[in-house]
Image (tube, rainbow, N blue to C red):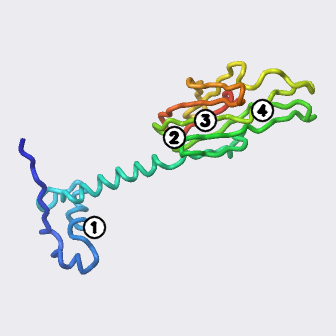
Amino acid sequence: MRIQSFRISYTDHPPSLKLWRAGRSPITDYRSPSFVRAMEGRPTANHRLPAVSILLLLAHMIVGATLFASEPIRVFDDFESGNMGVFRVEGDTRLIFVPHKDYDQDEINSAVTWFYGRLENVLDREIEIDITGLDYTVYNGKRGDILPFERNTVPVYSYDGRHWERFTDCRFDKQTRRFRIRQIFSRKVVWIAYIPPY
């Protein structure tokens, strides 16, 4: 199999010595006329883009994508009805939070169930969500005997804030009062909630 090599030509810009003196590389200088014409789809002197420039561009794209994926997920609840209680992110892809305890107007009844937030930087990453600090619901001044999620309630997620799906990989541990979710999302941004907001 014949491997075609790239040729580098400087026939359409000043000699390389002038570039070096100006602090610019004659090989990787993106401001050179040949590079500009190539990026604009116009023919260069030899109709070829320097191989080194191509490799540098590819490396830049790959490194940029890797750096973005390695950033921690971001959590927001600064919108209407948003509430993620007290939360933290561990190991870039693990969200741990304690839902806010809600009371009625007389502060007699209470529940630790509602959460609603937006996660970013989750595309194609396995995200683990740990909901902790769950407590029994108090109704008419009496504590119930069933913890949140013990009735097989399954939280939901949405990519547009309108159409909701239920999580499929969930597990409730009554002993530790912890509800754990695992999910690989197919978008960069996702909304999560106890039930679909209304």
- Residue 47's mark? none
Q: What residue type is labelled 2?
A: Val
Where in the figure is residue 124, as x and y percent of width and height? 45, 37
Indicate which disc, 2 or 3, sits on the residue closer to the N terminus.
Answer: 2
Q: Is label 2 or label 1 in front? A: 2
Give the label on residue 112, or none: 4
User: Label for residue 122?
Assistant: 2
Q: Residue furthest left?
A: 2
Of the image marks 4 and 1, the number of the one nearer the N terminus: 1
Label 3, label 1: how far apart the Cα atoms are:
47 Å
Q: In which quarter of the image is residue 26?
A: bottom left
- Residue lying at 77% horizontally and 32% vertically, measured from the top left: 112
- Mark 1 is surrounded, within 10 Å at the Cα level, by few (under 14), some (14 to 19) or many (20 or more) other residues, namely few
For label 3, the SS is strand
Q: Picture coordinates of residue 21 (x, y %)?
A: 24, 80
Is disc 2 placed on a helix, strand or loop? loop
Locate the C terminus and report the quarter of the image it occupies: top right
Q: Mark 3 points at which residue?
A: 129
Place of residue 84 in the rendered image (x, y in percent of width and height, measured from the top left): 69, 40
Q: Which of marks 3 and 1 is in front?
A: 3
The answer to the question of whether label 4 and label 1 lie on touching residues, with beta carbons closer than 8 A, is: no
Q: Are marks 2 and 3 in contact (CB under 8 Å)?
A: no
User: What is the spatial separation of the Cα atoms under label 4 and label 1, in whole angstroms?
Assistant: 59 Å
Query: Tag 1 or tag 2, which sits nearer the N-term?
Result: 1
Residue ID at (72%, 19%): 151
- The reply to whether callout 4 and callout 3 are in contact (CB within 8 Å) is no
Residue 148 position by quadrant? top right
Whether residue 97 is visible to the viewer of this picture, yes or no, is: yes
Query: How much space separates mark 2 and mark 4, taking CA atoms?
Result: 26 Å
Tell me the number on the disc at residue 31: 1
Say which amino acid is labelled 1.
Arg
Circle nearer the N terminus (3, 1): 1
